[in-house]
């Protein structure tokens, strides 16, 4: 069976809501989305192999494939896999960068290197992914080990809702960090998916 005319987006589960929303808003029915577990962010060394497996499982079924991950802590290993598989990904080091925009994120990082970032997904699932995922709920003594060098929490918001803002403030309180709010919307994620939907790869500029 030949490949369809659609594009497969292999995405981090933490981006599922935003990608589905962009697909609907921009009327990209030809984009099919398959997500990997968001929990992989706690084990970034497993991301490259998981992405490769997803690519190989779908090889030949789509006209093209695109990976909606940044490097995400893989230390360049994801790029090695993608070069071998000839598949493009979102630019940047992590989702915080493409939500905020590269220039704005660089300014945030320069102003305070000790910054912990939240997106809508992380604010919503903070207890499960951070407090439980890192074992802090069971061993509170781990909190200063993980977060002792942080000074502030910056919430990079994709949606403007009182509930999300309250959840992010509560997360900063749990970690004992100063709180800062930045509304980013979908940032450069929208640009990346648009290029993928049009079949334009980042190296083609």
Image (cartoon, rainbow, N blue to C red):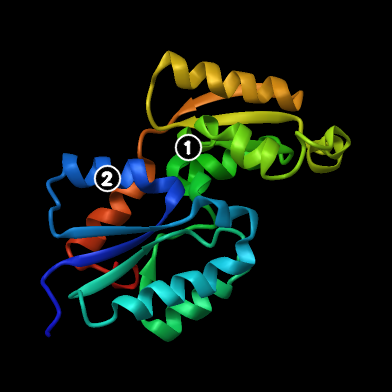
The residue under the point 54% across, 66% down is: 47
Mark 2: which secondary structure?
helix
On the image, the x and y values in percent for residue 203 come to: 34, 72
In the rendered structure, find residue 121 and report the number of the disc placed on it. 1
The correct choice, above or below, for 18 with respect to 8 in the image is above
Q: Residue at x 54, y 42 (%)?
A: 105
Image location of residue 65, percent across then percent down: 28, 71
Q: Which residue is mark 2?
A: 20
Residue at the spot 64% in from the left edge and 25% down from the top edge: 171
Alpha carbon distance from label 2 to label 1: 14 Å
Locate residue 43: give its quadrant. Answer: bottom right
Q: Quadrant of residue 175?
A: top right
Q: Nearer the viewer, residue 16 or 25?
A: 16
Looking at the image, the residue that sits furthest to the front is 138
- Residue occupying image coordinates x 26% and y 66%: 8
Question: Picture coordinates of residue 159 (x, y %)?
Answer: 37, 27
State whether residue 65 is above or below residue 3. above
Indicate the quadrant where residue 113 lies. Answer: top right
**Relative image position of residue 122 (x, y in whole percent):** 54, 37
- Depth check, front residue: 187 or 8: 8
Q: Nearer the viewer, residue 31 or 111?
A: 31
Where is the N terminus found, in terms of image quarters?
Answer: bottom left
**Left or right for 135, reference 84:** right
Relative placement, left or right, of 12 versus 113 is left
Quadrant housing the C terminus: bottom left
Disc 2 vs disc 1: Cβ atoms closer than 8 Å?
A: no
């Amino acid at each position: 069976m030949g490949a369809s005319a659609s594009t497969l987006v292999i995405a981090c589960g933490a981006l599922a809501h935003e990608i589905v929303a962009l697909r609907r808003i921009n009327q990209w029915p030809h984009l099919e989305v398959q997500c990997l577990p968001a929990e992989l962010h706690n084990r970034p060394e497993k991301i490259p192999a998981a992405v490769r497996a997803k690519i190989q499982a779908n090889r030949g079924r789509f006209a093209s494939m695109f990976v909606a991950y940044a490097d995400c802590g893989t230390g360049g290993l994801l790029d090695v896999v993608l070069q071998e598989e000839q598949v493009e990904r979102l630019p940047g080091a992590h989702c915080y960068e493409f939500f905020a925009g590269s220039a704005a994120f660089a300014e945030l990082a320069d102003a305070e290197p000790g910054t912990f970032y939240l997106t809508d997904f992380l604010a919503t699932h903070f207890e499960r992914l951070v407090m439980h995922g890192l074992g802090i709920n069971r061993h509170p003594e781990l909190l200063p080990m993980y977060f002792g060098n942080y000074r502030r929490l910056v919430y990079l918001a994709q949606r403007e809702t009182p509930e999300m803002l309250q959840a992010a403030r509560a997360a900063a309180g749990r970690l004992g960090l100063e709180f800062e709010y930045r509304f980013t919307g979908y940032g450069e994620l929208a640009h990346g998916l648009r290029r993928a939907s049009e079949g334009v790869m980042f190296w083609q500029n």
